[in-house]
Amino acid sequence: MRTAISTLDVRSVSTVGDAVALLRDEERAPIAGATDLFVALNFGTLGPKRFVDIWRIEELRRIAMVGETLTIGALATYTDVIRSPLIAARLPMLIDASRLVGGPQIQNRGTIGGNIANASPAGDSLPVFAAVDATIVLRGPSGERRVAFNAFYTGYRASVRRPDELIVAVEIPSFTGRQWFRKVGTRAAQAISKIVIAGVRDGNAARVALGSVAPTVVRARRSEEALAAGASIDEAVEVLRGEIVPIDDVRSTAEYRRLVSGNLLRRFWNETQ
């Protein structure tokens, strides 16, 4: 059964301070592009009914270099990412991921912060941030704090973000190496991923992360260590298949995900030589 829009209580703000105050004082949930919220609304699975709309907070749309760190504001949309010269120069695989998120309508509304906050293991941008050791910037009543992206998620759709905190940015440190991104879905675009993978290779040093193969995005540490130690790609593929914990669901099977994840790791290794 669909949730009636008339039952929702939404307050709109234009500053981070006002948003944090409402999160603290009125226990509201933040919304911006609402691309995931409206899916839940349509299916009648929406939990929160009290929201603070942060879409008008312009400072959260900023994409900039701060020293050697690329900073992407939480309200940067996928369209913003696709059009950003800074991201094209520093993190082009995030553009590859953004081009495969829905269609133009979703790309115009969906935000980087929303993808992170939604905490779906199928989020297309998440393996990119995991592979490059990004940092999530949170702001709450007690000020700002930073959390390593790979320590942010605690379980399926769960994170260390407190209810009174807002994701304000994601920071990407300087790194070297060839970047690689692939998404496998029912269609080439406008489909939820069956498997999504992002990697960076610098010689025999690799950083690899996968989505849709576990309750959270997975950084394939043991596979990376095997490759760095001189293991063959076939050996690394076997390590990876034991490192992920895919499930059977409506989109795919665990067996398929384990097989294709290994094939994608092999393609990443061969295509980034």
Image (spheres, helix red, strand yellow):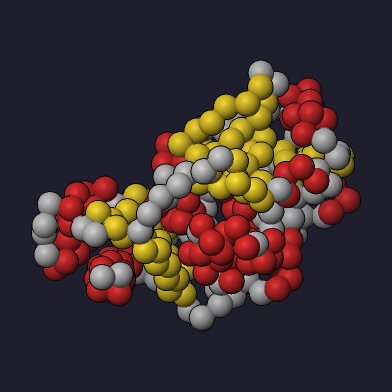
Residue found at the very far top of the displayed protein: 142
Q: Is 201 positioned to the left or the right of 212 in the image?
A: left
Residue in the picture at 12% in, 52% down = 229
For residue 241, above or below residue 169: below
Q: Residue 144: image x %, image y %?
A: 63, 26
Q: Nearer the viewer, residue 144 or 26?
A: 144
Q: Is 151 positioned to the left or the right of 269 in the image?
A: right
Residue in the picture at 66% in, 39% down = 168
Q: Is 88 positioned to the left or the right of 104 in the image?
A: left
Residue found at the very far front of the displayed protein: 67
> Do we see residue 245 in this rendering?
no
Quarter placement of the C terminus: bottom left
Q: Residue 38: image x %, image y %?
A: 73, 59
Q: Residue 255: image x %, image y %?
A: 27, 69
For residue 157, above or below residue 230: above
Quarter placement of the N terminus: bottom right
Q: Nearer the viewer, residue 241 or 95?
A: 95
Residue in the picture at 63% in, 71% down = 102
- The quarter holding residue 244 reads bottom left
Q: Is 27 positioned to the left or the right of 228 in the image?
A: right
> Do we see residue 167 in this rendering?
yes
- The quarter holding residue 245 reads bottom left
Q: Residue 140: image x %, image y %?
A: 67, 26
For residue 168, above or below residue 262: above
- The quarter holding residue 269 reads bottom left
Marker count (numbered):
0
Residue in the picture at 26% in, 48% down = 221
